[in-house]
Amino acid sequence: MTAVEKTYITVREERKMSRTTIARLTGFTYLFYIATSIIGTSFFTRITKGDGISATLTDIAAHTPQMNMSFVLALLTVFEALIVAVALYALTRDQDANLALLALTCRVVEAVLNTVPAIALLALLSVALQASTATGSEASNLNLLGSFLLKLQGWSVIVSAPVFGVGSALYYFLFARGRSIPVPLAYFGVLSSALLVVAIPLEGMQLLKGAMTFYAWLPSLFFELIFAPWLIIKGIAARVSNHALRSEETPTIIAQ
């Protein structure tokens, strides 16, 4: 074996290890993202069950620690979205750099939009604490502001979900094209993400309501609960070339 061949093999193995690490990081981050989103939403929903805006603000003021926890969890989703965006880009850019960059942009925008609920939570807690001692017109104004902030939570999801869906669909399409993960699984991810692109804007137009909105998220959640463990346990298949360490010839499983 020549020195060039040895160098090539060494670099290829280092690349495999790097992609394995990225794949596992992505899988764990997916699981943390799901957990923090569900727990944060659960906290917030329990706190804001009051009948009317006045009662809701009273409940919020009475549950300051839980609101602070909801804020921390919302803030975590910003960083989790960024980590997933960059990691998926690293795993798919060899297939098509332009599509991967577009997907990265969409998922970064998703992360930016995740800051809106976090800011709204802080503002809502501040308004609730002020409303607890306010009277007259000041109380009415605070109630109006509180009502707006509550609606802002839902509006941010309606805007971010299609962006998330487009970015995710592009990433999963690149996985399918490169056969980096099982093709049926990849295309299930594409379809479940495309469903969000179509369904969630309908909620904003009042064409989709109640449980139907919840059901629109289930395929995407189900996919991620399969995809994340796959990345952690199996990793992805990589293509390596003689020149740019990329190949269109022989897929190699990088993690078992």
Image: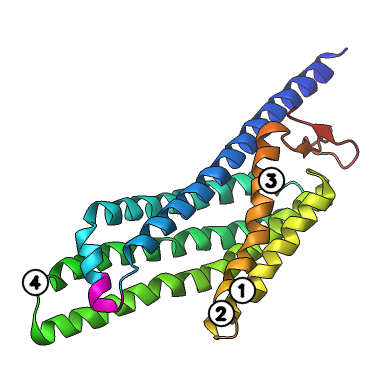
* Amino acid type of the residue tagged 3 in the rendering: Phe
Is disc 2 surrounded by few (<14), some (14 to 19) or many (20+) residues within 10 Å? few
Q: What residue is rendered at 80% in x and 38% in y?
A: 246
Instruction: Look at mark 1 in the image and give the residue it sits on.
Output: 212
Q: Earlier in the sequence, mark 1 or mark 3?
A: 1
Instruction: Look at mark 4 in the image and give the residue it sits on.
Output: 133
Instruction: Look at mark 3 in the image and give the residue it sits on.
Output: 227
Question: Residue 195: x, y in percent?
Answer: 69, 69
Which element carries disc 1, helix, strand or loop? helix
Which part of the image, by quadrant, shows the C terminus?
top right
Q: What residue is rendered at 74% in x and 20% in y?
A: 10
Distance from disc 2 to disc 4, alpha carbons, whole Å, reads 35 Å
Which part of the image, by quadrant, shows the N terminus?
top right
Which element carries disc 4, helix, strand or loop? loop
Q: Earlier in the sequence, mark 2 or mark 4?
A: 4
Question: Residue 125: x, y in percent?
Answer: 23, 64
Q: Earlier in the sequence, mark 4 or mark 3?
A: 4
Is disc 4 surrounded by few (<14), some (14 to 19) or many (20+) residues within 10 Å? few
Distance from disc 2 to disc 1, alpha carbons, whole Å, reads 6 Å
Q: Which residues are magenta?
A: 51-56
Distance from disc 4 to disc 1, alpha carbons, whole Å, reads 39 Å
Instruction: Look at mark 2 in the image and give the residue it sits on.
Output: 209
Q: In the rendered structure, are the residues bearing label 2 and label 1 in contact, judged by CB atoms less than 8 Å apart?
A: yes
Q: Is residue 173 visible?
A: no
For the view shown, which residue lies furthest in the top direction? 1
Q: Nearer the viewer, mark 3 or mark 2?
A: 2
Which element carries disc 3, helix, strand or loop? helix
